[in-house]
Structures are given as structure tokens and as C-alpha cells.
Image (tube, rainbow, N blue to C red):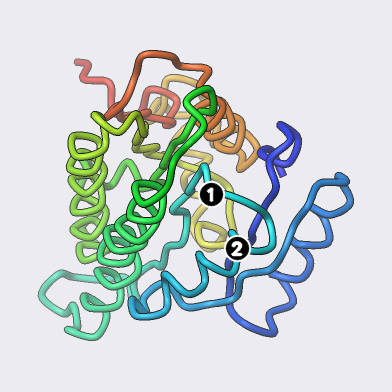
Amino acid sequence: MALAGEGFAIAVNGPEDDEELQAALDAVRALDVPAMASPFDVADLGIHDAHLATIEERLGPLTTLVNNAGVGVMSRGDPMDVSEASWDRCQAVNAKAVFFLTQAFAKRLLARDRDAGRFHAIVNVTSSNAIAVAVPRAEYCASKAAAAMVSKTWAVRLGTENIAVYDVQPGLIATDMTAPVIQTYEERAKGGLTLFPRVGQPEEIAAIIAALCTGKLPYTTGQTISADAGMLVPRF
């Protein structure tokens, strides 16, 4: 919705026949911008290009990719008890899909002439857990660390093509994924875990992403944006 507010045409990804996907699409369309649902599993690498082609056919040339799909662990607990299934699921969605959807997106951009006056960007949403360990979610942390390196790799590869790549690393954000533990984190934030004594809101992350996608940080690429209220600032 933040990107729609900047005038972007929007393709919204999510599971097929999903109520939340339809609700998101309806909300974007209410802002009177071209929009479509693009329901597919990002972990299914073989279908990436076909869906990107459909998006281009309906909405016009691709300019911007936001890799925001993510999953948590199947069960919080001791790393000694992490299952291979949970590890593979985190890697497949949080890291592998980010790399290969970016690859498919970049190939389409590089295969055609682009408007030199139009900003092109890729924004990967990883996590503060790309840096900070959360022992009960070890496999999640590993996948986000991998995704952070994916961001750097593509920033280096695509810099000469004038395609900017960024890594947004949210900290304590009030979302459905964090709902079971957010009250604990709210208390910890007030107790000094974050420099701003509160948890963040999804709209704040959206504002950061919209700024990046519209080139409001000119002459930058490869940056990590720590959207964590200073949580990871070293201090003693």
C-alpha cells in the first residue's frame, strides 16, 4: 500500500485462493492504482519467470522487486532439537527463493532496453536475526543471514546495470508472525532492549521500503537498513 501511494502498479504475491491475499489486493485497488494478484509459491523456483511474464503483460515493464515472503520456525526450542524439515523450510523460503526470484527478475530487466530515467530497485526484507542470535530460532537466523549475503551479492552484480539492491532488517515489529511473543518484546523494549522504548509497526517498515524503491536514497546500493530502533547498536 505504501508503494501504491507512490504511484506504483502492484502485483501482490501470496497463496492461491487465500483470503488475506484478496484482502490485500482489495486494499491496494482502493487506492486507484493498477493491481493484480500473483498467487504462487516463491519456493517453487521453476515458475518464477512465468509469473513475472504475466505481471509484465498486465501491468507493464517491471521496475521493482520486494522480497518480503518469509516463514518462521516450525517449533521454537533448543537448537539440539531442530528438525531438518524446519531447517529446509526456512532456507527454501527465506533465502533460496530470494536468490532465485531476484535472478529471474534481473534477467528480465537485463534482456530489454530500460528507461534510463526510471529508478530500478530490489529490496530484500531479512531480519535483525541476520546478525543477532535467537537461540530458540536458530534455523530462522541462519536463513536470514544467508539472505543478507544474497542481498550483498546481487548489489555487487547489478550495480553496473544501475539496479539498486537493499537489505532491510526489521527488529521487533508487531506482525502476525510475532504476535505470540510481542508482549514480551514490548516489555523488553521498554526495559532498554531498543533505543526507542517500543516495538515497531509494519507501516514504518513500509515507509522505509517505499523510500528505497523511489530512489530517495540516491547514489546508494548494497546498504543494510537496520530498522530496529537501535537494538543492535553496540553499547555498554
Q: Amino acid at mark 2?
A: Ile
Q: Quadrant of residue 163?
A: top left
Viewer-proximal residue among 77 and 31: 31
Q: Amino acid at mark 1?
A: Leu
Residue occupying image coordinates x 42% and y 63% = 70
Q: Residue at x 58, y 71 (%)?
A: 14
Q: Position of residue 191 (x, y in %)?
A: 44, 29
Image quadrant where residue 19 sits = bottom right
What residue lies at 33% left-to-right and 76% top-to-bottom? 45
Say the numbered circle drawn on residue 55: 2
Q: Position of residue 140 (x, y in %)?
A: 27, 62
Quadrant (top left/top right/bottom left/bottom right) for the C terminus: top left
Residue 149 figure quarter: top left
Q: Given contact means CB atoms under 8 Å apart, are the residues at marks 1 and 2 in contact?
A: yes
Q: Secondary structure at mark 2?
A: helix
Q: Earlier in the sequence, mark 1 or mark 2?
A: 2
Can you name the residue that lies furthest to the left here? Answer: 80
Q: Is residue 193 above or below residue 81?
A: above
How busy is the neighbourhood of tag 2: few (under 14 within 10 Å), some, or many (20 plus)? many
